[in-house]
Image: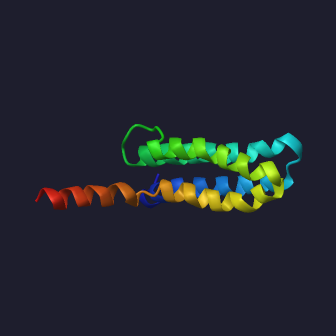
Amino acid sequence: MHIRSRRVAHGLLLAAGIVLSSLIAVHAAGGWIALAPLTLALCTLAASALDAAARGEHARPSAAALIMAAALPLACWLLAREDAHELARMLPVLGISAWAALSPETPRRRAACRHRGAG
């Protein structure tokens, strides 16, 4: 895989997860709507593992991805309790928050701060 495509592959996977989960939420009926947050959580975990593999680490999700994957179904359940249509409107927002938690810039900024403090 080309270096630039490795850098964006996890973002594209997460974007596809946001679109797919939103489509599921809009078109699902009854209990099938539960597949929407589960799809987004699975794509969050897969994107994190893909990002780790692209950086040369073990292909496993980060702690942030695991926390997000656990929080997404819970947040969606709270939203869908009152009105299932609310879930379809909020899934893209929840997906963006998952993307922010998996942003590859975050570890580099923390590492840079540690190096400045050591010198």
Q: Position of residue 20 (x, y in %)?
A: 72, 53
35 w.r.t. 112: above or below: above
Q: Position of residue 15 (x, y in %)?
A: 62, 58
Q: Where is residue 77 in the image (x, y as percent from the top left)?
A: 72, 46
Residue 87 is drawn in which quadrant?
bottom right
Residue 59 is drawn in which quadrant?
top left
> Can the viewer see residue 62 in this picture?
no
Q: What residue sits 80% from the left and 46% below the top?
A: 33
Q: What residue sits 59% from the left and 54% below the top?
A: 14
Report the quarter where the C terminus lies: bottom left
Asked whether 115 or 83 is in front, the reply is 83
Asked whether 46 or 119 is in front, the reply is 119
The number of callouts visible is: 0
Q: In this view, does 109 lie to the left or right of 37?
A: left
Q: What residue sits 86% from the left and 53% below the top?
A: 27
Q: What residue sits 72% from the left and 49% below the top?
A: 78
> Can the viewer see residue 99 in this picture?
yes
